[in-house]
Amino acid sequence: LRKIKEKLAPKGILIVGLKNDGVDLKQRFDMYKKEPNHHIYTWNPLLIANILDSAGYVPCHVMGQFDAWHKIDVVQYKNAKYDYCEKGLQKGKSSNTYNMWSIAVHPEQSTSSCPSYKKSVESIYNCEYLKSG
């Protein structure tokens, strides 16, 4: 994150999407030594904000929801994006897949822009950004 910040324009923003594995019920002790990715960290909104701050960013917002990718035909997706998104919410809830989106600004940027960035990232919540279009 610090190296990315060096490349980020002073008025740039950083958007990070992460899965919160801490709510994944399939991650049990009996999976120890069997889990191929050997994840050793998990994230929640507070920890994401902390790491962004530690890396020198100014966190504006972190939000999350249960959602998950699922298989779909590209033509179907283009014709029914909202339906695709809704199905992802249902799949996320049924599979306990919780994803988070965070937005942060370069420290040289005024935090007065944070409310509009927060509003933009919150439009992801419950597929709101697709309802108007």
Image: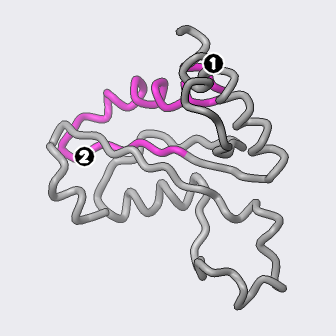
The residue located at (62%, 49%) in the rendering is: 99
Task: Give residue 106's mark.
Answer: 2
- Residue 113 lies, in percent from the top left, at 32, 28
Snapshot quadrant of residue 34: bottom right
**Where does label 1 land, which residue?**
80
Please name the amino acid that badge 1 sits on. Answer: Ala
- Secondary structure, mark 1, is loop
x and y percentages locating residue 45 in the rendered image: 58, 52
Name the disc covering residue 6, or none: none
Q: Is residue 113 magenta?
A: yes
User: Which residue sits at x=69%, y=42%?
Assistant: 67
Quadrant housing the N terminus: bottom left
Between marks 1 and 2 in the image, the one whose residue lies nearer the viewer? 1
Quadrant in the picture for residue 74: top right
Locate residue 72 relative to residue 124 in the image: left or right: right
**In the rendered image, the vertical position of residue 64 relative to residue 81, given as above or below:** below
Vertical order, 81 against 72 (above or below): above
Give, as a single range, the part of the protein colored magenta: 101-129
Q: Earlier in the sequence, mark 1 or mark 2?
A: 1
Residue 124, x across and y down, in percent? 56, 30
Q: Position of residue 61 (x, y in %)?
A: 48, 40
